[in-house]
Amino acid sequence: DIQMTQSPSSLSASVGDRVTITCRASQGISNSLAWYQQKPGKAPKLLLYAASRLESGVPSRFSGSGSGTDYTLTISSLQPEDFATYYCQQYYSTAYTFGQGTKLEIK
Amino acid sequence: QLQLQESGPGLVKPSETLSLTCTVSGGSISSSSYYWGWIRQPPGKGLEWIGSIYYSGSTYYNPSLKSRVTISVDTSKNQFSLKLSSVTAADTAVYYCARASGFSDYWGQGTLVTVSS
C-alpha cells in the first residue's frame, strides 16, 4: 500500500492567514492526489484533484501543488467557513489511501 | 444533480454481515465511465477506502479488507451494495458511498453502522 502522511495533524490559525498543509506519499504518485474538506457530521467535499486542479465551485483561495511524493494544499486567506478537517488521498494505486487528516482550528 | 443515498441497518451484531445499499439518482450508474465506491470513517478517526465497482461488475478492494468485502451492482435499480462479513467492534463507522473513479466528487451523506450485541 502507498502510505500518505499529512502534516501538521492540527493547526491553529486566524481569519486572513495563509495556511499550508503538506502530504507526503511513501512512493511517487504522479500527481494522482486529491484534497478534501470535511466539516463535523458531513461527508467530505472534494476541493482539488490531479494535485492542482480546482473542483468546480471551489473558491480560488484554495490551491494545490507538488510532484513526485510531496504535495501541498494552500489556503491563501482563511475564511471563517474554512475551519474544518482536511484530507489528502492518492489514487495512483487502485488501493486508494488517505492521509490521517489535518484539523484546522480557529486561533 | 447526481445524488447518492446509503441505506441499511444501523446496528449489526458481532460476527454477522454488514449490508448496505447505495441508491444513485440524477444519473445512470451505467451510462458513464465511472467507478462507484465505499469509504468508511470510524467515530473521531480518518477516512478509509473500502472498495469500488464499475457498472460491468469489475471490482477492486482495500487489501486489508479484501477477504471480508463484497461489492456488487444492480444497474436495473441504479444501486450498488456493500457486504462486510465477520464484523467486529472495529468495523463501527460512518459508511459513505461515493462516485469513486480515483477521486470522489459525489458523496452520500453517510450512515452510521454500530457493531454491538
Image (cartoon, helix red, strand yellow):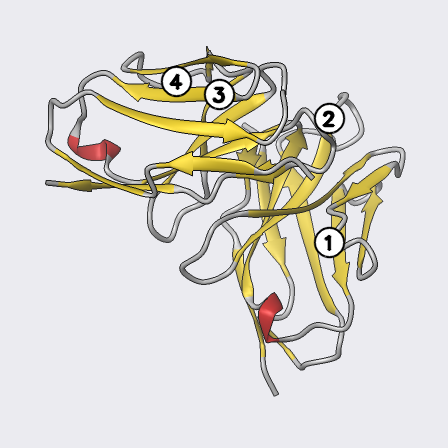
State the residue position of label 4: A57
Q: Residues within 10 Å of mark 4 (few under 14, many from 20)?
A: few
Label 3 belongs to which residue?
A: A70
Instruction: Find out whether the residues at labels 1 and 4 contact each other: C-beta distance under 8 Å.
Output: no
**In front: mark 3 or mark 4?**
3
Name the amino acid, label 3: Asp
Q: Nearer the viewer, mark 3 or mark 1?
A: 3
Residue at the spot 77% in from the left edge and 48% down from the top edge: B63
The crowd level at tag 1 (other Cα within 10 Å; few <14, some 14-19, many 20+) is few
Q: Which amino acid does label 4 sit on?
A: Gly
Report if the CB atoms under discs 2 and 4 are less than 8 Å apart: no
Task: Tell me, yes or no, whether the two marked residues, 3 and 1, touch with CB atoms within 8 Å.
Answer: no
Q: Report the residue at 31% width, 12% height from top.
A: A60
Distance Cα–Cα, label 3 vs label 1:
25 Å
User: Image point 73% across, 26% down: which residue?
Assistant: B34
Q: How far from the left and from the top, in percent, is residue A4? A: 54, 36
Q: How far apart are marks 1 and 4 (CA)?
A: 35 Å
Per the model, the C-alpha gap separating discs 2 and 3 is: 27 Å
Q: Which chain carries label 1?
A: B
Whole-number angstrom distance, CA of label 2 to CA of label 4? 21 Å
Closer-to-camera residue (A24/B1) = A24
- The dot on residue B35 is none
Residue A93 location, x and y as percent? Answer: 71, 29
Numbered mark located on residue B64 in the image: 1
Residue at numbered disc 2: B34
Mark 3 element type = strand
